[in-house]
């Protein structure tokens, strides 16, 4: 064989091998060999990944073109470097998608109810809706009728700030035994943040939906679309247009990200959305959502939440042992409403954090070994008392 004659490969793996042979007769052997190894690894990565046949063929063809480009222009050419960076980034995103990977659902209604009750007080209508959805999965799974499994409900939790919308979505994922991902919509100003940008642009990348699926590693995670009503006014129409497709069971089984440029089935994803109100959500999107109102908590409910959920968790996070801090029952009414009515529990959480931090400091300074917060000393823990 004439050593000056380039080897014409028939497939990507041969292309990489040919590039390596060509590099053996040229200077800078180490660098060129490394370059051809990178191309070979891309081809092997595509070959071993379970993905649609047509997409795999397209990727292998892209790797083959990359190997030919390297042979013709050299591994140090700007053209090859830019093409390699674009191709490797694209291939890594595509092979990272969970084309056929599913997490196993926790098909135990009793345990799921225990998880929901453990993490949240009340909210029975929402818990019932999740348990109903799980029941349909259980029945069809036992009957091996997977094609009959109902489309996941697309819940929209609407309520004032601090009522537990975001944490409830995480609890739903835990109850189902699924991965949990969150896409924040607050301040989102471009629909490309959701659908991605075409590979034709130098700064192209996939949208948030694809990124979260890659991170989850499964095809059926719980994805939280947080604060749908907080998108910017200028981009609201475009973003709502993407959401119409994203949240429609009849369309999202072939959702196409502009960067990936190949349909991906999102029908197994359980979407949960949140909003403070529905005024800024388009009618077409609302039509695809199951709107559930998150109630404002009464004082009695807040006391239960504070004593049963918040106080124990915050005390532990602060590093305090149960015997080191006690709060008398007589001061809880003032703790839950220090500055007037608050529909949520965020201010309550901050108040309890302040009490715990103050107690931790007293103990660390050696002034006391344990703290009892009561009517006599509550002012030293709550300046606004």
Image: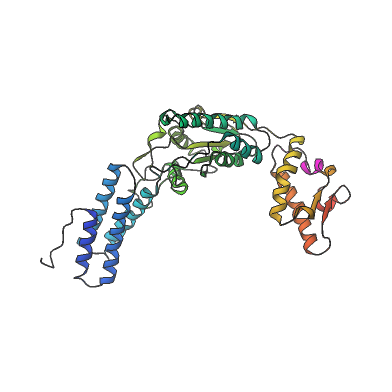
Chain part drawn in magenta: 332-344
User: Residue 123: which quarter of the image?
Assistant: top right
* Extreme residue toward the bottom, this view: 27
Position in image of residue 258 (x %, y %): 37, 42
The residue that appears at 71% across and 45% down in the rendered structure is 310
Q: Where does the image place residue 112, in percent across and percent down from the top left?
A: 59, 37
Q: Residue furthest right?
A: 376
| Residue 5 location, quadrant | bottom left
**Residue drawn at x 28%, y 71% as measured from the top left:** 30
Between 125 and 134, the residue placed more toward the observer is: 134
Vertical side of 195 occupied by 12: above or below: below
**Residue that appears at 26% across and 50% down:** 60
Q: Position of residue 200 (x, y in %)?
A: 32, 48
Horizontal side, residue 170 vs residue 240: left or right = right
Task: Please state if 226 lies on the left or on the right of 124 as rendered.
Answer: left
For residue 65, which quarter of the picture?
bottom left
In this view, the residue farthest toward the front is 142
Q: Is residue 255 left or right of residue 106?
A: left
Image quarter of the N terminus: bottom left
Indicate left or right for 68 with 308 as reference: left
**In the depicted structure, whether residue 33 falls above or below residue 232:** below
Q: Is residue 16 above or below residue 134?
A: below
Q: Examine the rendering and report whether any part of residue 362 can be seen.
A: yes
* Magenta highlight: main SS: loop
On the question of residue 280 being in view, the answer is no
Residue 293 drawn at (x, y percent): 62, 30
């Amino acid at each position: 064989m004439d050593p000056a004659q380039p080897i014409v490969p028939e497939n990507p793996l041969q292309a990489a091998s040919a590039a390596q042979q060509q590099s053996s007769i040229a200077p800078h052997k180490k660098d060129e060999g490394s370059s051809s190894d990178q191309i070979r690894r891309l081809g092997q990565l595509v070959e071993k990944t379970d993905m649609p046949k047509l997409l795999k063929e397209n990727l292998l063809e892209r790797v083959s073109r990359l190997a030919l480009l390297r042979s013709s222009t050299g591994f140090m050419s700007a053209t090859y470097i830019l093409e390699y960076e674009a191709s490797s980034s694209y291939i890594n995103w595509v092979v990272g998608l969970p084309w056929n990977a599913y997490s196993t659902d926790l098909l135990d209604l009793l345990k799921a109810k225990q998880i929901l009750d453990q993490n949240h007080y009340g909210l029975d209508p929402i818990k019932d809706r999740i348990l109903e959805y799980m029941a349909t999965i259980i029945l069809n799974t036992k009957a091996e009728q997977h094609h009959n499994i109902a489309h996941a409900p697309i819940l929209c939790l609407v309520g004032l700030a601090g009522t537990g919308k975001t944490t409830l979505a995480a609890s739903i994922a835990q109850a189902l035994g699924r991965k949990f991902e969150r896409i924040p919509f607050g301040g989102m100003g471009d629909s490309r943040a959701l659908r991605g940008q075409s590979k034709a642009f130098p700064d192209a990348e996939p949208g948030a939906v694809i990124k979260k699926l890659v991170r989850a590693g499964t095809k059926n995670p719980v994805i939280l679309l947080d604060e749908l009503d907080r998108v910017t006014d200028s981009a609201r129409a475009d973003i709502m247009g993407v959401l119409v497709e994203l949240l429609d069971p009849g369309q999202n089984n072939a959702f196409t990200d502009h960067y990936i440029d190949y349909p991906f089935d999102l029908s197994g994803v359980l979407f949960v959305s949140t909003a403070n109100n529905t005024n800024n959500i388009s009618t077409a999107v609302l039509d695809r959502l199951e709107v559930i109102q998150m109630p404002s908590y009464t004082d009695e409910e807040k006391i239960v939440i504070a004593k049963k959920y918040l106080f124990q968790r915050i005390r532990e996070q602060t590093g305090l042992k149960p015997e080191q801090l006690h709060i008398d029952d007589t001061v809880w009414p003032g703790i839950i409403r220090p500055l007037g009515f608050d529909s949520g529990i965020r201010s309550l959480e901050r108040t309890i954090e302040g009490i715990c931090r103050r107690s931790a400091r007293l103990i660390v300074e050696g002034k006391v070994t344990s703290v009892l917060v009561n009517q006599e000393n509550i002012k030293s823990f709550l300046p606004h008392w």
